[in-house]
């Protein structure tokens, strides 16, 4: 009987020690995990904050880039809505998904509406994407999409105008060698060439198409050139004799 009691005590001691050990481990992982989580959360918050700050106030504006068929300016499409996306042709996820979304958006427009919309794809992979590659890639999704490229400086300037962010990532184990982390936003420019809106990744082509239809039906007031100040009418001196009046009327304006 005494032996049985000792065995029971030993079992209870072992169970108790196990509970204490598991509790200690749980507390340890909770504390260290919370600290790690706080660090990661802070890092992610800082990264998101910097990206938000960079994208918060896109200014848009005129730009000049290049297609396989020649130079292209944003002002070439004045009077049309422009739907624009930044990416690269070897992207395997966000780019084809967004390009498909643009293509599906185009398919929901009537022929008349389609004539008033110009989709654009801008590649920031200048090392790999030739203008011919960009044209072929864009046309694969929809014949209406114009593919544009340029120098690193040109693309960087346009991306900054619209708040687009991209960074090159080396991928040693990939045959491609490198890829890009980038924003997957589609940008909208109105008929006056002014930045109007942006659509987040995977918003839905139905929503984008409805927005385009609304803006086509309710275009902005056309931008008009700034009026030039009118010149004050020139006054001529009063001439007393009719003969002198007749002479002055036909004389050259600049007299010495």
Image (spheres, rainbow, N blue to C red):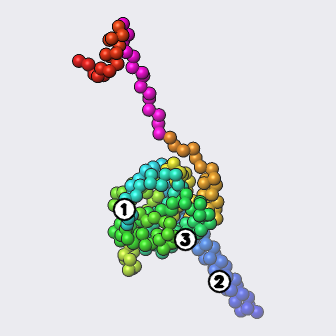
Instruction: Give the extent of the magenta segment.
Output: 225-240
Between the residue at mark 3 and the residue at mark 2, the CA separation in whole angstroms equals 62 Å
Q: Residue at x 64, y 62 (%)?
A: 207
- Is there a contact, CB below 8 Å, between mark 3 and mark 2? no
Q: Residue at x 32, y 21 (%)?
A: 250
Q: Magenta stretch containing residue 234, yes or no?
A: yes
The mark that comes first in sequence, 3 or 2, is 2
Callout 3 secondary element? helix
Q: Which residue is mark 1?
A: 70
Q: Taking 102 as reference, is 149 left or right?
A: left
Closest to the observer: 179 or 152?
152
Q: Which residue is mark 2?
A: 14
Label 2 crowd bin: few (<14), some (14–19), many (20+), radius 10 Å: few
Residue 147 is drawn in which quadrant?
Answer: bottom left
Q: Which residue is mark 3?
A: 100
Please say if 93 is above or below 234.
below
Please say if 15 is above or below 248.
below
Tell me residue 76's x, y (percent).
44, 54
Question: Mark 3, mark 2: which one is toward the viewer?
Answer: 3
Q: Magenta stretch containing residue 175, yes or no?
A: no
Label 1 crowd bin: few (<14), some (14–19), many (20+), radius 10 Å: few
Callout 1 secondary element? strand
**Which quadrant would the N terminus be assigned to in this image?**
bottom right
Tell me residue 187's x, y (percent).
52, 58
Between the residue at mark 3 and the residue at mark 1, the CA separation in whole angstroms equals 25 Å
């Amino acid at each position: 009987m005494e032996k049985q009691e000792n065995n029971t005590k030993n079992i209870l001691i072992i169970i108790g020690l196990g509970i204490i050990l598991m509790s200690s481990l749980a507390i340890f992982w909770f504390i260290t995990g919370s600290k790690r989580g706080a660090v990661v959360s802070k890092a992610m918050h800082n990264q998101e904050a910097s990206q938000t700050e960079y994208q918060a106030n896109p200014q848009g504006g005129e730009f000049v880039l290049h297609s396989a068929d020649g130079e292209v300016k944003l002002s070439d499409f004045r009077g049309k809505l422009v739907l624009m996306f930044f990416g690269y042709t070897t992207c395997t996820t966000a780019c084809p998904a967004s390009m498909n979304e643009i293509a599906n958006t185009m398919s929901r427009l009537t022929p008349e509406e389609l004539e008033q919309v110009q989709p654009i794809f801008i590649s920031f992979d200048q090392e790999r994407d030739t203008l011919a590659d960009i044209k072929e890639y864009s046309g694969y999704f929809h014949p209406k999409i114009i593919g544009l490229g340029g120098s690193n400086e040109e693309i960087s300037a346009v991306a900054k105008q619209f708040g687009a962010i991209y960074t090159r990532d080396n991928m040693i184990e990939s045959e491609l060698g490198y890829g890009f982390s980038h924003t997957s936003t589609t940008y909208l420019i109105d008929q006056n060439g002014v930045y109007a809106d942006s659509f987040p990744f995977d918003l839905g082509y139905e929503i984008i198409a409805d927005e385009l239809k609304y803006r086509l039906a309710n275009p902005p007031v056309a931008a008009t050139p700034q009026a030039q100040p009118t010149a004050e009418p020139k006054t001529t001196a009063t001439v007393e004799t009719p003969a002198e009046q007749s002479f002055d009327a036909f004389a050259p304006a600049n007299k010495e």
